[in-house]
Amino acid sequence: MVQNSPKAATVPAASLPPRRSSLDRYFAISRRGSTIGAEIRGGLVTFVTMAYIIALNPLIIGTVPDINGNLVSGLPFMVDGVVSGSNSGATIGMVAAATALVGAVMTIFMGVYARFPIGLATGLGINALLAASLVLKMTWAQAMGLVVWEGILITILVLTGFRKAVFKAVPHSLRIAISVGIGLFIALIGLKDSGFVRSGTGTPVTLGVNGNLFGWPTLVFCIGLVVLIILYVRKVKGAMLISVVGMTIVAVILEALVHNGPYNDGVNIHPTGWQLNVPAITGKLWDLPNLHLLFRVDMFGAFKGGPTVVLSVLLTIFALLLSDFFDTMGTIFAIGSEGGLLDKNGNPPYMQEILVVDSLAAIAGGLGSVSSNTSYIESASGVGEGARTGLASVVTGIGFLVALLLAPLVNLVPSEAAAPVLVLVGFLMMQQVAELDWRDLEESIPAYATMVLMPFTYSITNGIGAGFLLFAIIKLVRGKAKQVHPLMWVIAVLFFLYFAQGVILHWMGL
């Protein structure tokens, strides 16, 4: 006798969970409380707040000659004793194209492989170090070779599990402090990039031009910030993107009417000019990219010389490594916390994958001759807009690919239109300060040092280093050394060497 199998319980169609697309399932869009629309908006906001690097990086590394008098392109900086404008212009175009390409590839890789809403591009700080210091002693190809070595070392640390272990060893109070400090830091970046805050005469910083808010660009920033706050408090979807696009249109119209011009035209400083990008359409709106810079790398040339030269190079790589290592740590904590993406232990999903991509980005930046690529804290703007998954990073990366062909159009976005987003995101990240127990001095003093030194020294790494050192020292003098994770002691020693490297090099006569 054949028995009929019991019938499955009938569930009303209305109560069945909606079918999710493969895109939704892969990126866990619904599971992270997001939508495809929110991811697209967030990815676009991250792109427009990062796009300045396409214009800024060429000015940093594309206009400085190396020890042989050549630009990063290999073209001579001077011809017959006169600065070659054509060589500089060609090199700037090459750097812009390579910057956009490497940023696009690594950001898309982050989205698809690590599924985390972070954009990557050339890191500010390391590129300035290359231009202001390293190429005075070596060629551009050799300097980029050191960047590749630094990326290889970080990748090894990731694959061996050391970098992930360090992340997990950081105490909760310092994680909060890192996020809050970065919030203050990116707010300062926004205020500075807009010209709202500047270096003062007799004071470290001042309001606007000599203490006064003056000029059309400043007006664009102020209106943009007020509009953004109004949209945000009224919970308008796409508030940040609306603000950036709207104020860019206003800026383009203003520039067409008043011909305000740049802050620095290469000859003179114009205090009321646009800080980074001039919102004016000049020449063609698109062009084929010149990718001549790719793979112009000398991996071993910088090591040629005696033991002193080799030691100096190794210390340089160590400084690059620490900067990349801990800048990324701070960025991941901050983005994860802002988006509610951290688990109960304070760790993001796919941490190992995130670290692998970020480490390989350093190598890619060196091979692309655009300096180390790293995770951008400006990604917090996209998270503030609603981005929660790697789909947003894919959108950001596509933005960089479009910029390869439409660089003039991308450069229409002035920093004054994008900066309000950074200021508002700084506020959002600052809210976590309420989680700190300020009465516990062992926890709060290191946290305080971390928070204030990030904006005051304009460095995420410096803030993290000071906080780690003070945490270890205070626990030691209070007889609680066992409460400090062994890896924290290792990091504290490394940061001691990091802060003392100037004294060490001076003592060695380097």
Image (cartoon, helix red, strand yellow):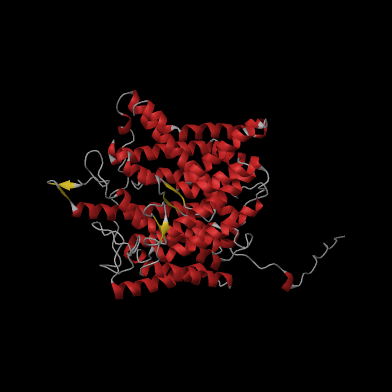
Is 446 in front, or is 386? Answer: 446
Farthest right residue in view: 1
- Please tell me in which quadrant of the rendered image residue 431 appears: bottom right
Q: Could you tell me which quadrant the C terminus lies in?
A: top left
- 413 horizontally vs 135: left or right: right
Label count reads: 0
Residue 361 percent coordinates (x, y) = 44, 46
Please tell me whether residue 134 is drawn above or below residue 271 in the rendered image. above
Residue 248 percent coordinates (x, y) = 40, 70
- Please tell me in which quadrant of the rendered image residue 447 appears: top right
Residue 410 percent coordinates (x, y) = 36, 64
Please tell me whether residue 154 is drawn above or below residue 248 in the rendered image. above
- Please tell me in which quadrant of the rendered image residue 74 appears: top left
Please tell me whether residue 143 is drawn above or below residue 331 in the rendered image. above
- 3 horizontally vs 459: left or right: right
Farthest front residue in view: 202
Residue 224 percent coordinates (x, y) = 46, 69
Is 292 in front, or is 409? Answer: 409
Is 21 in front, or is 460? Answer: 460
Farthest left residue in view: 80
Q: Could you tell me which quadrant the N terminus lies in?
A: bottom right
- 374 horizontally vs 282: left or right: right
Is 21 in front, or is 373? Answer: 373
Residue 73 visible in this rendered orientation of the protein: yes
**Residue shown at 51%/55% (left/top)?**
111
Residue 391 visible in this rendered orientation of the protein: no
